[in-house]
Image: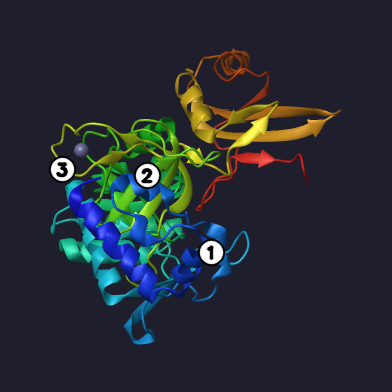
């Protein structure tokens, strides 16, 4: 931890203990006093913040400033339980747009670019966050919002959009549609900024190749500003994050002990500058690692790796932990297997059974795909599974996050 970061961290602790009812209460119930935090090593003594606590604070229990300083709220989707509401001050909104603009600049986006924004606007942080970054850079925003592929493609052609922002699933929908209609020559896209869900190398290369564009992975979460807290650069060796605004730690999701740089575990984020709803050691449930050393691109900002899964996507089958990221990696090395797959886990006759359903690439001549997948899975992950090979397009596509693991054991 750099000295300036530790200074910001200590200022944050003071602000929390003075202004945040949520943290005042939390500090009261833990044994650690903020005066005990004298060096960066002491940070691991501080309590974590969890998503459940954020839900329990619904609606505005996280607010750490007087009402007149709150200028906006955003909310995470409430698909599983109560939503989390995050209040923002004017400075929070400004800081977020600075981070987003850094992302776009790292991706080489200039005032001459036209950026088609396909994620949703509204309570969700995505659309409006991207918009603020585009305007800060001085490029032209084309604020489409989600869905309506017909209109997306029409605007893309008529307005000559050079960049598009999308989730990876929707980017795939667009890429497949462009190819199907043979309209690539009328499309002026050069770059895609793709984010908000974990995705494999194969999916990335399909989007990249079918649209013939450069792709940049963007990361973020509503609880911590929104998208735009990190982006991968042209070297594609990890995502640079803005360590003047955020402090990243990696912990073992089971023991909660800090892990060394380079080791995979759960990402924990502290917001160093946030005012409206500052968070201390927030457990993101995203699995990644911090990448040691400097990036060849010369950026002074540190890097984390792509998100390989979520702690709650991790499923235990026949006693073995399985992450979606592992499956992506496995399929990447199998000739003829596409990036699209779905896992079905059932409990049959007292035993777990896992079936991996994979779409086969259009022109692949690999007729042993099923056996190869079963064999490779056994060798790499250590358990026997069933496999099913499907044609391209047979698995459901989604404009939102794809459900890749269907665990039907406990329903
Ligand atoms: Zn770099």
Quarter location, residue 305: top left
From this view, report whether residue 49 is shown above or below residue 65: above
User: Who comes first in sequence, dot 3 or dot 2?
Assistant: 2
Q: Is residue 225 left or right of residue 391?
A: left
Disc 1 residue crowd, few under 14, some 14–19, many 20+, Cα 10 Å: few
Question: Circle 2 sits on which residue?
Answer: 249
Q: Is residue 59 left or right of residue 125?
A: right
Quarter location, residue 12: bottom left
Question: Observer-nearest residue: 67 or 136?
Answer: 67
From this view, report whether residue 269 is shown above or below residue 265: below
Mark closer to the observer (2, 1): 1
Q: Indicate the secondary structure of the residue bearing disc 1.
A: helix
Seen at 37% across and 64% down, the residue is 127
Task: Please say if the residues under marks 3 and 2 sit with CB atoms less than 8 Å apart.
Answer: no
Question: Circle 3 sits on which residue?
Answer: 300
Mark closer to the observer (3, 2): 2
Badge number at residue 126: none
Residue 361 on image: x %, y %? 50, 26
User: Who comes first in sequence, dot 3 or dot 1?
Assistant: 1
Quarter location, residue 406: top right
Question: Circle 1 sits on which residue?
Answer: 29
Residue 379 on image: x %, y %? 57, 13
Q: Indicate the secondary structure of the residue bearing disc 3.
A: loop
Q: Is residue 113 left or right of residue 348?
A: left
């Amino acid at each position: 931890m750099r000295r300036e970061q530790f200074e910001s961290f200590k200022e944050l602790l003071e602000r929390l203990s003075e202004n945040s009812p949520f943290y005042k209460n939390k500090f009261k119930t833990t044994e650690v006093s903020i005066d005990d935090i004298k060096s960066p090593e002491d940070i691991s003594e501080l309590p974590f913040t969890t998503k459940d606590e954020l839900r329990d604070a619904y609606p505005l229990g996280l607010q750490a400033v007087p009402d007149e300083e709150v200028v906006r709220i955003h909310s995470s989707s409430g698909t599983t339980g109560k939503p989390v509401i995050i209040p923002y001050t004017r400075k929070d909104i400004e800081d977020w747009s600075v981070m987003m603009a850094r992302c776009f600049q790292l991706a080489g986006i200039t005032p001459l670019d036209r950026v088609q924004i396909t994620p949703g606007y509204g309570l969700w942080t995505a659309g409006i966050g991207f918009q603020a970054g585009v305007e800060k850079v001085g490029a032209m925003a084309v604020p489409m919002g989600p869905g309506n592929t017909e209109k997306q493609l029409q605007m893309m052609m008529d307005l000559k959009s050079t960049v598009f922002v999308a989730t990876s699933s929707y980017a795939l929908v667009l890429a497949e549609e462009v190819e199907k209609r043979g309209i690539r020559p009328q499309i002026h896209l050069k770059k895609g900024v793709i984010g908000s869900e974990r995705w494999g190398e194969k999916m990335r290369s399909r989007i990249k190749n079918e649209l013939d564009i450069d792709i940049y992975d963007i990361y973020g979460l509503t609880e911590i500003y929104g998208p735009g807290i990190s982006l991968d650069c042209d070297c594609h060796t990890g995502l640079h994050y803005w360590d003047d605004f955020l402090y990243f730690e990696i912990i073992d999701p089971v023991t909660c002990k800090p892990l060394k740089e380079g080791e995979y575990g759960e990402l924990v984020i502290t917001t160093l500058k946030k005012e409206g709803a500052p968070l201390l050691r927030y457990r993101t449930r995203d699995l990644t690692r911090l990448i040691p050393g400097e990036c060849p691109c010369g950026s002074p900002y540190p890097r984390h790796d792509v998100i390989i899964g979520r702690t709650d996507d991790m499923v235990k089958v026949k006693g073995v932990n399985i992450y979606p990221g592992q499956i992506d990696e496995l399929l990447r090395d199998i000739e003829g297997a596409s990036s699209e797959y779905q896992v079905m886990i059932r409990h049959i006759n007292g035993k777990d059974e896992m079936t991996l359903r994979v779409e086969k690439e259009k022109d692949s001549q690999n007729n042993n795909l099923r056996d190869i997948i079963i064999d490779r899975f056994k060798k790499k992950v250590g358990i026997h599974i069933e496999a099913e090979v499907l044609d391209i397009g047979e698995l459901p596509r989604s404009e939102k996050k794809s459900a890749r693991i269907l665990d039907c054991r406990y329903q």
